[in-house]
Structures are given as structure tokens and as C-alpha cells.
Image (spheres, grey):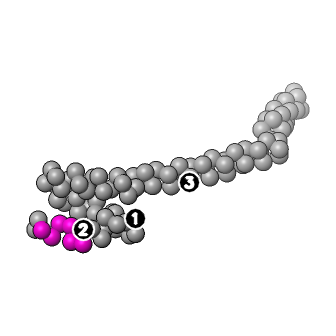
Amino acid sequence: MRKIIYAVLFYICLSTCLSSCVNRSRFIEANKTIDSLKTENARLLAENEELLNGEERLINLYNMNVSKGNYLSAEENYNNLVKYHPESISIMRWSNPLGQFF
């Protein structure tokens, strides 16, 4: 009786171990998919950063905040413009953008 119980337990353990193994080709395919998703994620994050800190958007936010009298936000927009777009001609135009308000 004991041998039968051990044989059944051995069979259950063996079948569990063998059925839980992953095929190598499926493993490689899964890794390729993960790598491509990581690459796509990095590309989308860069695109999102570009859209959030685009030159035209920052200039429009700056102008809108100055017209509303929200000078702290306007200064933050100006600093982001200087940080992300130092070549912008708007920076040259506004040499001291908020100095006249303080």
C-alpha cells in the first residue's frame, strides 16, 4: 500500500514538473516581445516629453500665464523653455521676461 502511495505521489510530482517547463522557443519569443515593448515604451516616453515641453506649447503657456497675471507659472514656463529649447528666438526676445513685473 505504501509503495502505491509513493508511486502516485512520484507520478504527480513528475507530471507537475514536466508540465511546468517552458519551451525554449516560446521563452525566446517572449523575451523578444518584452524587449520590443520596452523599446516602444521608451519611444513613447520620449515623444510624451517632447509634446509636454515643446517650444510652441511653452511659449503659448508663457503668454497665457502673463496675460492672466499668473507670473509664477509664467516664470516656470520660461525656465522650461530655456532648459529644453536654448536655441529658441523667443528667449532672445525676452531677455528679462518677468523683471518688469517684479
Q: Is residue 35 above or below residue 11?
A: below
| Residue at 19%, 60% in the rendered image | 72
N-term-proximal mark, 3 vs 1: 3
Q: Nearer the viewer, residue 20 or 49?
A: 49
Q: Is residue 64 above or below residue 80?
A: above
Q: Nearer the viewer, residue 37 or 99?
A: 99
Name the residue type under label 3: Ala
Name the residue type under label 1: Tyr
Q: For the N terminus, which image quadrant?
A: top right
Other residues around mark 1 within 10 Å, as few (<14) / some (14–19) / many (≥20): some
Q: Quick check: 19 left or right of 45?
A: right
Q: Quick check: 41 left or right of 75?
A: right
Name the residue type under label 2: Trp
| Residue at 45%, 55% in the rendered image | 50
**What residue does disc 3 label?**
42
Q: Position of residue 41 (x, y in %)?
A: 56, 49
The magenta stretch spans residue 98: yes
Q: Position of residue 93 (x, y in %)?
A: 27, 68
Quick check: can you spot residue 46?
A: yes
> Which residues are the magenta region?
94-100
Q: Position of residue 20 (x, y in %)?
A: 77, 38
Q: CA distance from mark 3 to mark 2?
A: 34 Å
Q: Secondary structure at mark 1?
A: helix
Q: Quick check: 54 left or right of 26?
A: left
N-term-proximal mark, 3 vs 2: 3
Q: Secondary structure at mark 2?
A: loop
Q: Position of residue 45 (x, y in %)?
A: 50, 52
**What residue does disc 1 label?**
84
Other residues around mark 3 within 10 Å, as few (<14) / some (14–19) / many (≥20): few
**What residue does disc 2 label?**
94
